[in-house]
Each structure stands twice: as C-alpha cells, then as structure tokens.
Amino acid sequence: MRNIFGVGLIAWVGSVLAVAQTAAPASAPTPAATTALASAPTTATAPSSDWTRIAVPPGPSLRFITAMAFDEARGNTVLFGGDVPRVGVIGETWTWDGKTWQRHPGPEPEPRYGHVMAYDPERKNVVLFGGYDRGKKIWLPETWIWDGAAWTKHAVAGPSPRRNPAFTYNRGRRAVMLWGGFGENPDGSEIFLQDTWEWNGTEWKQLATDGPPPAYGSEMAYDHAARRLLLFGGNDHSNNVYNHTWRWTKDGWLKIETTGGPAPRGGAQLLFNPRTQRVHLYGGFSPGEGGRNLKVHLDEWSWNGTAWEEVKDPTQPPLVFPKMIYDSARNRLVYFGPRTFQSQESEVWEKQP
C-alpha cells in the first residue's frame, strides 16, 4: 500500500491525524555505506520558553507545503507559494517582520508547492528552487533569487525537476546545497533522488550522486559549533521512512551510526539553536497504522555532536506540514502552518530558542 507521503493533498484532507509524542524509534533500512560510530545520549536538553501564538493582522491565507527563509539582510521572514486542498497551488510572496505581514505583488515565480528556499549570506539574497504545479501537472526546475524587493529568474542548468529536497546554506562551502527529493521519470513514473548539488550564486555544480538512500522530506542544517552540515531522515513511497543522520565531508556523505534518537520520519524541521549551540530537530511526520493515516510527531531533539538528546517537555504546536525559521534579528523561532487539514487559516507561533 502506498505510503501516505505519496498521496496528493486532496487525499490527505479528512485523514485521521494520530498525534503522538515519539517513543523509541523502530529500526529503519540501512544502506551499505561508510559509517562513523557515535555514542548513545547520556543527558537531555532543557527546553526554552513556551511557544506563543501570535495574533496577527491579515496575512497569508491557508496553505500547506509552503517555503520560508529568513532574510538576514532585510531582517524579515520571506514566504512563497504553497498548496490549498480543493483550490490549487499559490504563487504569492509575503514577508513577516514580527508585527505585520506584507504582500509583495509583481513578477513572481509560478504558483507551486514542494519548492525550497534558503538564505545565502554570501550574496545577501534568498534562493528558491523547484516545486510542482499539480493543477497544470508541470514540474518547475527553476532557480529564482529574491533580493528583498523583487524576484529574478536565473535561466541556468542544474538539478533535475523535483520537489521537497533538502536545502540549506553550507557556510563551510559558502554555497547553498541541495540533496535528494521526489521527481518523475520521462515515462511518468516516480523517482526518488540522492544527488547533491550546490549553488554558488551564478551556477549549479553537482557534487555527488550517492550517499543517503533516495528520499524526499529529508532536512539539512549547518552546525555552526561543529562547522558541519547535517542531514536527517526522509522517506520514499515504498514504506521506507528513515531516522538516519549524515554529515557532509570533503569526500562526500558520511553516515553517523547512533543508538536511540528520533523515530523515523520525514518533514522534520532542522535548525541551529544559538542558545544551546546545537542543531535541533522539531516534529515531522510518518505513516500511521497501515500506512494510511498520518502520524504527527511533536517531539524535539538536539544534536550534541555525536548523538541525539530528547528535549524534556516540548511545547511544540501541533501544526500540519509547517515551516520553521530562526529570526536572528529578533532572536525568535517562527513557526507557520495550519493546525489540521480542516483548518480555515494558517497560524503563526513564536518562541525564544
């Protein structure tokens, strides 16, 4: 039976959500790969302040599987696109400064969902790649740049069409990096990817064709303390859901063998926390009983450099397919998304890291 991650949003509407605090993870498929041994966690990370829902003036409407990035140069959060069940994909650009949402009309990327965005501090802009328009049934392997005022399309060769790859800025290489994702073969059959690319501001360069097993819904984050790029989790449509942790090295991807840790999942949020000086993992999703219902994970974990430690008593809001960024101008985590598939609006939550 096909994994719930492979069903379109229309089929997800009305799904029964099994909201669960994550227990000990089940084993996940392990590919043959070079590994690094890591010890089991010995302590737990204390939580910071609670999440607070922000009562905001009119802003982005209800949407799922949008993309966000924090624009450090302009000091605001940039949001683009998304999908609305029974309506279609959206092509709107919004910014959030902590008080108000601002809509930015004008030339924009085509409506889409499953695209990814990341801030590039080297060039002081936001990079957008990929996505899918389910109404027109077209893939959008495009690279767009947001400079704080307008989008510019860069007509360059690069990664194949895909949605939901892992995407973040790698300060060690001074480039935005992309891994994996979900795409389509020329005959229309689905394909899960495992290639690695980087964007240097003018062109894409392929760095590797192997590493973690093909998947989408994986997440990457740069560990500023250890100066390493980490990748976690992901899934495909063969009921493979992963809880593996990898790091990028000069020789490619290296799998870190750990015991315990987060349960297998896709769609987790992975960010560096300046308070703890660690990468933190928030939530995510996995198939429920029989692969039909969606289990929403509400746990939080921190990476101590060798293993995952669970954060005690997390207070994470139970949002569906949310996005999270760190607002360095205000020292806030910003969490955006709807509460259920039946919600009529998206919510904004914030907390200090």
Image (cartoon, rainbow, N blue to C red):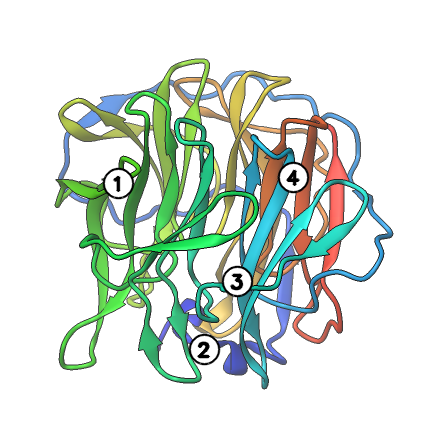
Q: Earlier in the sequence, mark 1 or mark 4?
A: 4
**Residue 271 x, y percent position in the rendering:** 52, 33
Please report whichever mark, 2 or 1, sits nearer to the chain's N-terminal start. 2
> For the point 54% across and 66% down, which residue is it?
82
The residue located at (40%, 14%) in the rendering is 226
Q: Which numbered disc, 2 or 4, marks the residue that appears first in the sequence? A: 2
Label 3 sits on residue: 65
Label ID, residue 8: 2
Amino acid at the residue labelled 3:
Ile
Q: Are marks 4 and 3 in contact (CB under 8 Å)?
A: no
- Label whose residue precedes the other's in the sequence (3 or 2): 2
Q: Which is in the foreground here, disc 2 or disc 1?
A: 1
Q: Dot 1 lies on which element?
A: loop
**Who's the residue at 47% across and 54% down the image?**
151
- Image quarter in which the N terminus is found: bottom left
Q: Which residue is mark 1?
A: 202
Mark 2 and mark 4: Cα distance apart in space: 31 Å
Q: Are marks 3 and 1 in contact (CB under 8 Å)?
A: no
347 to the left or right of 194: right
Give the amino acid type for the residue marked by disc 1 in the picture.
Answer: Thr
Q: Is residue 175 above or below residue 102?
A: above
**347 or 98: nearer the viewer:** 98
Residue located at (75% from left, 73% from top): 344
Residue on which the image places disc 4: 76
Could you tell me residue 154's position as x and y percent? 30, 53
Q: Is residue 26 visible?
A: yes
**Amino acid type, callout 2:** Gly
Relative placement, left or right, of 350 versus 248 is right
Horizontal side of 291 relative to 276 (left or right) equals left
Of the pair 234 and 56, the residue shown nearer to us? 56
Which quarter of the figure is the C terminus placed in? top right
Neighbour tally class for label 1: few under 14, some 14-19, many 20 plus, Cα within 10 Å: few
